[in-house]
Image (cartoon, helix red, strand yellow):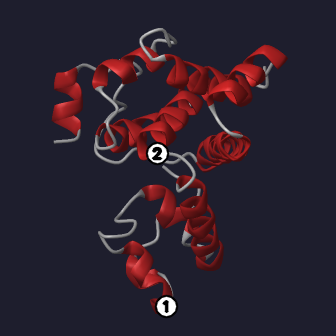
Amino acid sequence: MTRLDLLDIDEIPEEYHYLFTDDYLGDRHIFRVWAHNPELLEATLEYLDTLYDQLTPRKKELVILTVARARGARYEWHQHVDIARNKGVTTDEMRAIGGDNFTPFPPEEFVLVQYAEAVATGDVTDEIHGALCQAYNSAEVVAIGLIVDFYVGLCNYVASVDLPFEGGAFIGWTPSDERVADLFA
């Protein structure tokens, strides 16, 4: 059970109800917890929208999945398996990240996930950073680092409030196509 209640829409000031429409957030548990401070929820979402616009949706999801795996963050992994498949990430690619194997990715994405893992674990080397700078411009390098840092913090926060999964049991680090289809049909 979560350490902070999952608020229902009628427990949130009406001016913030728009955040919980299906077109915006829907009914994710993390946002229902953050709704205890709707002003911060709104500001955080604006910040994330700006960050997300810096990378393609696919690359953003590769980064998030890599951070979730590197941090052992089951909630974040579970959520983004569902989200990433709608952004062009295949189940095989998710299994590769979940199994700590980045070799299936083309060079530009290989260095992206390698860098995301290094930032998430605090193990960035000059070599990894230099490789990222060869594949991405400096503005993208900043955005990648900030997305990783945001998700490292989010993984820690989710663990601190003991947030339960939406939609059933943990998908697993190397989910089968069938399991993904069953949980996220």
Where residue 97 appears, as percent x and y from the top left, is: 47, 19
Quadrant of res 67: top right
- Residue drawn at the location 63% of the way across and 72% of the way down: 43
Viewer-nearest residue: 180 or 54 = 54
The image position of residue 61, as x and y in percent, is 46, 39
Badge 1, how many Cα within 10 Å: few under 14, some, many 20+? few
Instruction: Give the amino acid at mark 1.
Output: Glu
Q: Is residue 168 left or right of 73 when viewed as pictured?
A: left
Q: Position of residue 47 (x, y in %)?
A: 63, 64
**Disc 1 secondary structure class:** helix
Outermost bottom residue: 14
Inter-mark Cα distance, 1 to 2 = 31 Å
Give the numbered dot on residue 15.
Answer: 1
**Which residue is the extreme one toward the right?**
126
SS at badge 2: loop
Let me know if residue 75 appears in the view: no
Q: Quadrant of residue 73?
A: top right
